[in-house]
Amino acid sequence: MREHLFIRLRPDSTECSWAVLDDDGRLIRPVASGPLAQAAQAIGNERVIVLLPGPQVLTLQAAIPKVSQSRVRQMTPYLLEESVAEDVERLHFATGRRLESGRIAVSAIARDQLEGWLDVLANAGIAPDAVYADSDGVPDTPSTLNLLLEGEQIYGRRPAQPPFVLDGVALPEVCAVLEARSEDRSDLRHVLIHVDEAAEREHRSGIAELEARLPNVAVRALADDLLHRLGATLLFQPGANLLQGRYAPKSNWVEMLRPWRAAAGLLLALGLVSVAAQGIEFLKLEREDRALTSQLAQACEENFGSSQLQLCATEVRRRLNDAGEASVADSESFLTTLVAIAESRSDTSMIEALTYRNRVMDLRLVAASVPALDLFAQNIMQTDRFDVRIESTADTGSGIEGRIRVEVNAP
């Protein structure tokens, strides 16, 4: 299992916090704080991920056609030109994954600001594998407004919307602004507030006011530093990596391949021999195919009165359907769905119950977190054979129970 070192930078400071998480978002090394040089000493074989202060990065969503990634990066600045106050030529735009809505997550930051942070990291001896806005680590939970409180800053995200960061704004005012900006307030019926002890004391009156105003407000204490929550979310719901275009990590491929020249020559020779052998085998198979086709045409003529293979195949399928092919196909769909669920489930999740009817499987799955449920659904949908929908989630105390619907796509 791969390990990930998250380094969260502080605005206008060389201080930072860092921690190591595994692929499942579990804390391997506890959160530590100190100078950036000290964080550099903690780097081993982990993947290094740097989080920039959220207020310095603008997070958006853009409706971009399905084109190549290079074309997406070229189109993004012009599509978002009216959404940013600064000249797009002075901004660096990074694109992330395509969301369920069809839109693409986008992060924008001033070029001189990003270059300044990269210089600070380079001077400390840190070469990150990825750079995100720390606000991208706010969880995206269906039907729930997530709020993360840290000092006077409030990090938040509405379902399927880009994250936001507000500084010096009272907690009730945040919800009032969100209510005023949206006709659909259904996501404000469920508010989940993540808070540590210090932030709970600072925002106690605001939390109490929200609990009185809104029907369902839950407060979840952070067992560790906010960095753990942000990092765990980014592992399952990655935002837009700012290291794109001119800022993408560069590799010296010539120097890396130089020691392998002799091996590459041998591999090329082996490849040529293999291609020649496959060519001979292909000619042999082609002759056998012609012979089998001739025999099959003769059999079709004897049994169906036509030597045309297409007509013969149509008649065979018709007779199979009459013999009950439909029930066999339904059985195969059930087994295929069951296999996809088994391959997508992690070792830490557990299936509580499942039912199958008419190419649709409903199941109750208990996972470690909401992001883990989302990853399970995405793994199944990657096969392009199923439509997956998380219909509800509930915190059972021992994990997050999700009710998930998996439907086999029509052939």
Image: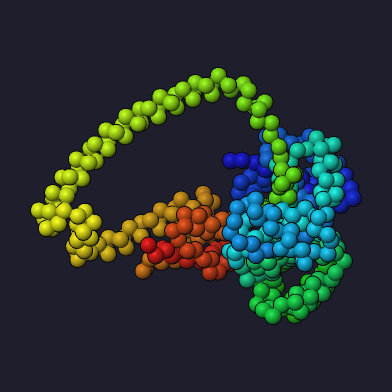
Q: Nearer the viewer, residue 126 or 198?
A: 126
From this viewpoint, is residue 221 visible? Answer: no
Expressed as whole percent of the image width and height from the top left, the position of residue 93 reads 74, 54
**Colouring of the image:** rainbow
Residue 344 percent across, percent down from the top left: 49, 52
Counting the numbered discs, the total is 0
Q: Is residue 62 left or right of residue 326?
A: right
**Residue 406 located left or right of residue 402:** left
Q: Residue at x 32, y 29 (%)?
A: 280
**What residue is drawn where x is 35% and y is 31%?**
279
Q: Quadrant of residue 122?
A: top right
Q: Residue furthest top?
A: 262
Depicted 334 relative to depicted 13: above or below? below
Outermost residue toward the right? 12
Location of residue 274 with respect to 121 vertically, above or below: above
The residue at 77%/53% (across/down) is 92
Horizontal side of 79 relative to 364 (left or right) equals: right
Q: Is residue 213 above or below residue 123?
A: below
Where is residue 65 shown, x and y percent of the image?
61, 61
Q: Which of 355/202 is in front?
A: 355
Q: In this picture, is 134 found above or below 216?
A: above
Residue 149, percent from left and from top: 79, 62
Q: What residue is drawn where x is 82% and y is 50%?
A: 111
Q: Quadrant of the N terminus?
A: top right
Quadrant of the rendering where the C terminus is positioned: bottom left
Residue 119 shows up from this direction: yes
